[in-house]
Each structure stands twice: as C-alpha cells, then as structure tokens.
Amino acid sequence: MVTEYICWDCEKGYRPQDLQRAAKILKQHGLVAFPTETVYGLGGSGLCPEAAKKIYEAKGRPSDNPLILHISKSEQLPMIAERIPDVAYPLMKAFWPGPMTLIFHKNKCVPHEITGGLETVAVRMPSHEAARMLIEAAGVPIAAPSANTSGRPSPTTAAHVREDLDGRIEMIIDGGAVNIGVESTIVDLTEDIPTILRPGHITKDMLQQVAGEVRMDAGLLGTDSDRKPKAPGMKYRHYAPRAKMTVFDGELDVVVKQINDRAREYPAAQVGILASEETADSYTHGQVVSVGSRNAGTIEQGLYSALRLFDHKGVEVILSESFSQEDKGEAIMNRLMKAAGQHIIYLSRE
Ligand code: TXA
Ligand code: MG
C-alpha cells in the first residue's frame, strides 16, 4: 500500500480537499494517522470491527489490548457509554477537550473488537484542532491507539509515524511536533472511587481538586507482581528503545558522577546517556542525548524522541538520569521505567 501524506498547519488548518479525503478513508474503514496534543494516533472508524482489526494488524498489537474512542463533542458520549456517574461531569468540564481518557461502561453499539472483549470503553476528547476536525468530518467516534508499532516509543512527530507505519496505512497527517509528548491520563470511572490506570499530563492532584478522592491503580504502584495493572496495555513492555536501559535515581550530582563512571566501562559508540539540558555537558564519554530542560519543564515533551534517537545511534546500553522530582514526574517516570524494564538503581551520597 502507498501511504499518502497530507499537512495540517496550525494557522491555515487543512486544505478542504485533504480533510475530505481523510474522512473518506475513515468512512471506508481505512486507517489515518493524525496528530493529537499528547502523541500521534492511528485512527480508524470507532464503531467498526473491520477497522479495529486493521488497527491491530498495522500496529502488530495483541487484540486483547483495547482502543480509546476519540470524540469531538459531549453529545457523542451517550452513544458509546452507559451509566455515566455524576463525578464524570465536573471532570469533563475541567479537562475536556484535553489529555484525559475516561473509562465507562460501554454501550452495546461499541463492538467488542474495539474494547478487547471488555464491557467497558475508554473515551477521550482531544483538544488538538486537527484531531477534532477529523472526528467531525468522519461523523463517528475515532478509535485511535498511539501510532507506533507495538512495543516502540509513541510517536511525537509525523516522521516517527512514518518510521513505523509507512506502507501499512492509507494516510498520515503531518501536524508537526505534538505539545505534550506522553499519552493521556486514564481514569477509570466504573469503580466507586475514580482510579488512575495510566498517569499523564493531568496529575492526580489536578483530578482531586475537581473530583475529590482519586486513587492510583494498585498495579501501577510498587513491584507487587500479583497486582496486574487494570489497563490491559500497561502490562506489556512498552515505549522501549532497543538498547538495555538503566535509570539512576538520587541527588543529581551523585547521579551524574555514577553515570560517568559506568559509561567508561563501554566503548563510547555503544553507550547512550539520557541527560537533561542542565547536565548534558557534564558527561565526557558516550552518546549523550538531552531529553529537554528540567528548569523549563520540557522533559515530558522530549522523552519519546530521545528514546527513538538512541535506536538511530545504535547504542547497546542506555544510562539514564531520573526525573522523579520534576513537574509531571509521575507520568515521565512511568514511561521511563517501562522503557527500562523497571531497572532502576537508587544512589545515596557516600
Ligand atoms: O493520549 C492518548 O491516550 C493517545 C492518543 C492517540 O489519544 N492514545 C493512546 O492509546 O495512548 P493506546 O492505545 O496507545 O493506549 C490506550 C491504553 C492502553 O493501555 C489500554 O489498555 C487502555 O488504554 N484501555 C483502553 N480501553 C480500556 C478499558 N476499557 N479499560 C481499561 N483500560 C483501557
Ligand atoms: Mg500506545
């Protein structure tokens, strides 16, 4: 298949004929990758089993891992979700459109192919104008996982999508680099207390200010292997670069020294160092990639690009700083720890 590329420009928007072609592909159950504010999504018609099958195939993703339905207006919600609890309304008012996904009981018109066999459905209203216009034009909710092949870091540019899916889907919409850089916060509203199944840009504190008590899914916390995360996708090794990665946590000067010492155990071409703008110059040996600035809060945005860059550099080992103390640290560390297969070393000052 030849993948068609079209552009969405933040000032000019779409050329009308491009938007129509994209919508037509979706209506005919084909696949269109598009930008959202979090990461690029791989879109297919949201109520159609055939489109769901194509999504799983293109991504090489296990079909028990459910998809998020993307809507452009609240009126679309009752079509796909049932028994919407009261707490949903203030949350939607505060954070939609935006990087928050809510889990509801599904309406019967949502096929099990979309929900991975579950009786619940994940719903998100993205704020990115390109995404909203595409959903409007398609006239149905759009099912969209991140537009990477399964197991690779989520794409934050159209070039990342091309790397993974060129020739496997009908169209890629290039809207430039995304704003946020990690996937939406997922909140399960089918339990008594709203439960975070995947941390994201909308933090637990932000949710609690609006919804009262909110908890983290036990499967996301600690290393208790009996408690499986409730979002099926969270159990897979994810977001991963090809190299073996270790995260070093502790006071920053101690971390920098330790990474410098360890890096020298490898040839410089084979060892990658995941640093921040503030520390990148402190490393003297290895392939140093700055993920973004701690002070300017751009770590979240640069994370997946940095992980992909190590694949291009072909390093075999990655030594990474920890970002647990930064703003949005919960979301960043969740992805970083998955990329590292949970391999972290805590350092203390001697
Ligand atoms: O920011 C985002 O959420 C991006 C953009 C494209 O919107 N999408 C995204 O989709 O990250 P995906 O498929 O890569 O991740 C969806 C996650 C998976 O971990 C999946 O298991 C979980 O949502 N999920 C979907 N439906 C669910 C359900 N009914 N119950 C629990 N978890 C669910
Ligand atoms: Mg994904």
Image: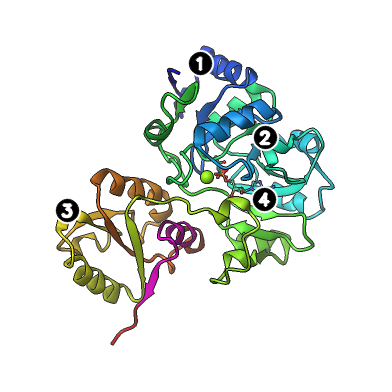
The reply, left or right, for residue 283 in relation to residue 199 is left
Q: Earlier in the sequence, mark 1 or mark 4?
A: 1
Whether residue 8 can be seen here: no
Which residue: 28% across, 76% down? 254
Residue type pointed to by label 2: Ile
Is 345 covered by the magenta stretch? Answer: yes
Which residue, given by chain and number where applicable, does mark 1 sit on? 18
Q: Between tags 1 and 4, which lies in front?
A: 1
Is 5 covered by the magenta stretch? Answer: no
- Whether the residues at callouts 4 and 3 have beta carbons within 8 Å, the answer is no
Work out whether 48 lies above or below 214.
above
Residue type pointed to by label 4: Ala
Q: Earlier in the sequence, mark 4 or mark 2?
A: 2
Give the residue furthest to the top: 17
- Residue nearer the viewer, 101 or 221: 221
Q: Secondary structure at mark 2?
A: loop
Q: Between tags 4 and 2, which lies in front?
A: 2
Q: Secondary structure at mark 1?
A: helix
Which residue, given by chain and number where applicable, does mark 4 sit on? 94
Which residue, given by chain and number where applicable, does mark 2 sit on? 71
Which residue: 43% across, 69% down? 325
The x and y percentages for residue 206 are 61, 60
Give the residue furthest to the right: 83
Residue range corresponding to the magenta coloring: 333-346
Q: Earlier in the sequence, mark 2 or mark 3?
A: 2
Residue type pointed to by label 3: Ala
The x and y percentages for residue 339 are 42, 56
Dot 2 alpha-carbon crowd within 10 angstroms: few under 14, some 14 to 19, many 20 or more: many
Whether residue 167 can be seen here: yes
Dividing the picture into quarters, in which one does residue 196 lie?
A: bottom right
Which residue, given by chain and number where applicable, does mark 3 sit on? 269
Question: Label 4, label 3: how many angstroms apart (C-alpha)?
Answer: 47 Å
